[in-house]
Image (cartoon, rainbow, N blue to C red):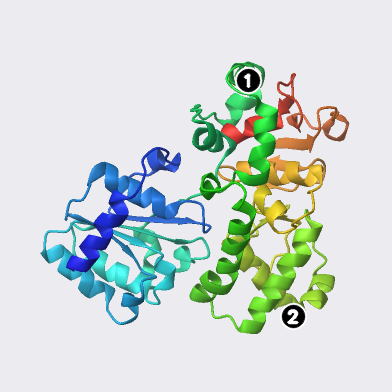
Amino acid sequence: MIEFIRYSHSRITDTSLDFSRSMMKEIDWSHRLIGITGSRGTGKTTLMLQHLKKNFGVSESALYLSLDNIYFLKTNLVDIAEDFYNNGGRFLFLDEVHRYPSWSIEIKNIYDTFRDLNIVFSGSSALQIHKAEADLSRRTAIYNLQVMSFREYLALSEGLVFPTYKLNDILQNHQEIASELARKFQPLPMFSKYLQGGTYPFFIESQAKFPERLLSTVHVILETDIPAVEKITYSSIVSLKRILAFIAESVPYKPNISELSRKAGVSRDVLLRLISLLERSGILRLLRQDSSHTGYLTKPEKIYLDNTALLYALSPGKVPEKGTLRETFFASQLTANHNVTIPEEGDFFVNNEILFEIGGKNKTTKQVKHSGHAFIAADDTVTGYRNIVPLWLFGFMY
């Protein structure tokens, strides 16, 4: 146990508190079992370590463990938790749980056995927590850490701290909000930088090496994270890479299942399952016309990459088409806290009531003129007018 405590204290001590993701304040840390999911690279580990540092320091009542440690191939998590508890431990933080085969059963056993032990665990969004063994899901408060918003990017890169705004506030008061923000920084050049390399917090380590680091992260997801939680063969991993390469060149992609099945060399059912895996691992975003049918066998209406930085990383040397960048950004920011589907008219339908058309500053309302509650999300403009809202402003919702 002493080695685990030393490792935990070392990780906590080395963690910076200069910048924290907005989710830090949204989590109810008093809940006895908390799960934090999210794509690799979004900052789940840092979030946990920052909470530990702020609230416990190097106290032996709190312990951080990463379950991808080779030690966990020869030991039992329940036994470690018992030893920790018997020595006064009351707050157990478990990282990379998807790398530990029986994570859900053992966490349930720990939760049920040690009634005053608080547990926080994190893992890839590929985890099927709501289908976890041992009925763990109903005991757990789940939080999903999204990629960084434009607002968070400004805080980390420039030290500019701004409040968040609800969607309705933006739609009703966008002129005032945009004008006030624009007095503090130049939105358009900063927005362009964010789209290319600001969606993952590790950009701060090296902007020049960011694309390479992101591409490496994608490979780890495909070759390590997904196989850790799904029974998947090497040939299926190869198919995943083929599918991703094809979609990355074609987004936003309206799926032709027969064509994509042929290119990937897999059946329709296998193809849809693999696409679902890419979505749950945070690489793709699947949007449908009807949000009520979300099983993997339901063909999506459109497929996007999860965020704009992936557009650059997966197509090196190629500048993404502007319309694709705009739609990918909008979908990424809105789906964090809202229901987004594909309408028959316009680009996106939000919360089953608000229609959005995405475009440049000269975009007209022609395509949505028949809708009573419609807006234009306009790029390349600092401020808007009436129902024309600056696209960058939607990056201030979390």
Q: CA distance from mark 2 to mark 1?
A: 50 Å
Q: Is residue 108 above or below residue 396?
A: below
Mark yes or no: residue 398 visible. Answer: no
What residue is drawn where x is 27% and y is 77%?
76
Q: Is residue 328 above or below residue 90?
A: above
Q: Position of residue 74 (x, y in %)?
A: 30, 82
What residue is drawn where x is 50% and y is 33%?
155
Q: Residue furthest right?
A: 366
- 234 vs 94, left or right, is right
Q: Earlier in the sequence, mark 2 or mark 1?
A: 1
| Quadrant of the rendered image containing residue 211 | bottom right
| Quadrant of the rendered image containing residue 21 | top left
For discs 2 and 1, the disc positioned in front in the rendered view: 1
Query: Which amino acid is tagged 1?
Result: Ala
Query: Which amino acid is tagged 2?
Result: Val
What residue is drawn where x is 66% and y is 71%?
274
Q: Which mark is residue 182?
A: 1
Q: Is residue 395 above or below residue 302?
A: above
What residue is drawn where x is 78% and y is 49%?
320
Q: Is residue 26 above or below residue 84?
A: above
Q: Which mark is residue 206?
A: none
Q: Position of residue 257 (x, y in %)?
A: 80, 69
230 or 159: nearer the viewer: 159
Disc 2: CA contacts within 10 A as few (<14), some (14-19) or many (>=20): some
Q: Position of residue 331 (x, y in %)?
A: 67, 45
SS for tag 1?
Answer: helix
- 391 vs 123, left or right, is right
Q: Position of residue 224 (x, y in %)?
A: 53, 73
- 70 vs 372, left or right, is left
Q: Which mark is residue 266?
A: 2
SS for tag 2?
Answer: loop
198 or 120: nearer the viewer: 198
